[in-house]
Image (cartoon, helix red, strand yellow):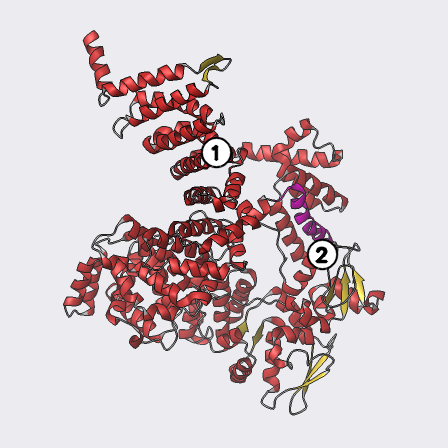
Amino acid sequence: MRSSSTKQVAENNRGLNGRFFTLRSRLYNALALGLRNDEGGRRWCCTDVETQRHVVRSIDAFLDCISSDTSQHPLVKESLADIVPALGTTLVQKNEAVMKLASKVFVRMISVVPSTILESLVLDVVHPVSSSLSSCHESVVISCATALNLILSSLSSKKEKEVWKILEETETIDNLIHHIRSSGSKPAEFFLETISLLSKILWRFPSSRFCVWNNTALMEVVASLMHEPILSVKASVLQLYSTIALCSNGAEKILDSGNSNSLLQMMVECMDGSNPNYLQLAGFTLAECFSVSEKGGSKMVESYCEPLVKAIVNGLSLHSHSGKLTKEQLSLIKVSCCVSKIICWPGKHHMHFWKLGIESVLVKLLLDDLHIKKLTQFFLSSEDFSAMAQDCLSANFLLVIKPHLWDILGGLAAHCAEDFHSQMLQNEFHLNILITCACLGFVDSLRSTRQSCRNAVHEPVCRAVLLMIYSPSKYIASKAKSILSGMLKPNVKEDIKSTSISKICCYGCEEDWQGEESFLVYGLLGLAELVHHVGSVKGNNVDWFELTESEMITEVEKICINSYASGSRWYGAYLLSYFGVYGFPSKLGNRIGNVLSGDEDEHTNLRLILANQEHVNVHGVIVSVGCPSLLPSEGKTIGRKEIRLSAHVNHHALLKLLEYVYSGHLKAGEEVVKKLKTLAKHCNLQPLLQLLCRNRPKWRTRAPTFDLTPALGPNGSHFSDIVLEAKGNTYEGWMCETCSVSHPHLHAHKAILCASCEHMRALLCSGMQESHSESIKVDLGWEALVRLVNWFYSGKLRPQPKYGCLWHNLNEKEKLDEVIPYVELYCLSDSWLLEDLHKECLRVIGSCLDSVKMAIKIIQIGADCFQWDLVELAAKFIAPSYHHLRSSGELLQLDEQLVDIVRVASVRLTQRVHHL
């Protein structure tokens, strides 16, 4: 037995030498000097400085004997469980000399011991280390920042919430901000470690971003560091900006700042291939964050188009300089691919990519050099070429970036000019390879019957083929059609996010061409092409469709009206153009359009006179917003009652143009379309002209919205004929740009108000007292009145409540102040019979409910206004907490009837849970 036991011990201690056991023994002798007994058991506690030093040195010596082989040993794990509390307690004793020593040992321990071993002790490590960041000693702060950086780099998602709670308790963000703001006289290492840790925290924890980008003093300090000549400092600054820009609000704050141009210049310069990899990567990462939104992408392109494109192409070309890619090079190629997605946004940059030979760069990322040589060495038939290309694709070269390559190719094809041709290419053969490989991927997706139609592998290549087939460039479109048709002859899908960023927050739906409605977009596109080729739904072709022409128009108009996505609305409008309907139907446009088609010239204030003396009475405010080119230049319209038009303007075409101006869309036969094209071109109505010419929509171009809110600004004030006043006499910071009246009001227009709301029509057109008054008091606060009028002028409830980090960083009162205007509007919309507004307000209120106090307040307001749907909504929200709220007395502020409504909601919830 003894022999067996001895062998087992020897086996367990394999890899450990005598030095290990000696140092471990010394370690425990030292630890014993500070062990104390208390109610919770034995814990380490010592205030003697010399003993603390002795213990820390013993720990350091023990760590010196731990290797990668021995780190997994049970004795090491057991020792670490005793080391961490002792080291942590020593660190927080605030003795400068001991803190310096202990913080360095913490760094060494985290570096030596695998994260999987430390995972169970990570909270005991984070607390003392983050607490010590408040130290005024530079070396302590540097070591603690380094240690936390190492921990966060390998932190498991299971521990994130607990770690973030500790960082909040120890005020880590505030301490780092303080250190960075005061780092001017400190060594560069101090700045680098603190800003690196702050960046890591912002990347890990989205809720931390607001307090950083909202700190003006900090952002000024960071901006001043952009001009530092030290490359590592530049990289750290870019890294911090990148993590701030992960938040949509933070990115917008950066882009709107006075330093944005300097930052973009530094970013593009750092992306240049002459810089070290780490600096290039920092520049590309920030560019990737900005490219997520159209605003960020457009600003980069407008400011630094050519150097930006050159840097991207160089970043993608790294593979050509060496045989095997390093980890850093692959990272740079991947982030370059992500920044290349600016191709998906409209702009002037697409041609620069072709000039720099992007087709050759993409081919070398898609296929290895050996396979490219095979394709170029022989004269092959199209069938043999396709077969060899298939073999090349099967080599699985750089699979991780293939989806990005297809997105780049599709984006370039979608934004090609109509006159794009082969002479504009650096290598036509390489483009043929790309198109062939894409078509092979498309055919493969069709044959993979077991795959989901939204398969993440096939969807990008299918989209690329679709965009090439419908490219504005006849050259690319014909190439793609020819190659694809050849492949399909013998045998007569969820969206990949364009960015590698997984930690973005607060961004709205920028991907409305490729997101949830992507299949609707493709369906509308295919249907439009089918209608284009068959010519009509009528006559012999009726069997092709389940719907008649009028039914088809009605269904597509519903899509345009009910969809918020630009892709669906553009292709819906494109499809409607084949049925003689041109424009973008909307509910508000239909209401305003009734003003033009009415029998009476109600509230018209301008007469358009043609050369033959025919005339049309119009509303100056609507024409000034919808088609300002019909009116004289700004300022010359004031006081005028008549406008004489050119002899080239046709009366019928003018009426149709006004139909578009008033409603956002028009119906016209082919005989008047030609005249309309000329008029639309002279009036610079590009969306209408595009639809009249039946040109395919440009990929990811924003669809126009019917919006009359510009009339509420200074340019529309001289057409104003009514003033709307909010309740209350004051509003902080309020000032009118049009008049000197001090109480909150809006200069509005009777024609728009009457068209948008029957209640306002009754007030202004019925002969009642209000119809003769120059102003009307509305029973709403200023914020609610602004949203009501915006609804009348745009059909949208704007401004929307704050969201994301802006919302989460409001206190209870501020959140309630954000919601109250919508509650006011909800009550008013019920009495004014504004059904759509009523529903939208309820939706917004429901999305903002996030606390019991707010819900109780809304229950009270809803009951006072007899809005029982609102009461029911808030009651359902607090139903899960009913018993706790009842026992705690928080429901005492509600009367028994309202408490009973909450109780019933709680009972229903319980029954539903039991049923499930």
Label ID, residue 130: 1
Q: Residues within 10 Å of mark 1 (few under 14, many from 20)?
A: many
Q: Earlier in the sequence, mark 1 or mark 2?
A: 1
Q: Is residue 630 left or right of residue 274?
A: right
Q: Is residue 552 above or below residue 31?
A: below
| Alpha carbon distance from label 1 to label 2 | 41 Å
Quick one: SS at disc 2?
loop
Q: Residue furthest top?
A: 1
Q: Nearer the viewer, residue 135 or 528?
A: 135
Q: Residues within 10 Å of mark 2 (few under 14, many from 20)?
A: few
Quick one: SS at disc 1?
helix
Q: Is residue 882 above or below residue 546?
A: above
Label ID, residue 916: none
Q: Which image quadrant: the N terminus?
A: top left
Residue at 45% over, 74% down: 695
- Name the amino acid type tagged 1: Ser
Q: What stretch of residues is rendered in magenta?
A: 810-830
Residue at 46% over, 55% down: 226
**x, y percentage for residue 107?**
38, 33
State the residue position of label 2.
733
Residue at 25% over, 52% down: 325
161 in the magenta segment: no
**x, y percentage for residue 20?**
27, 21
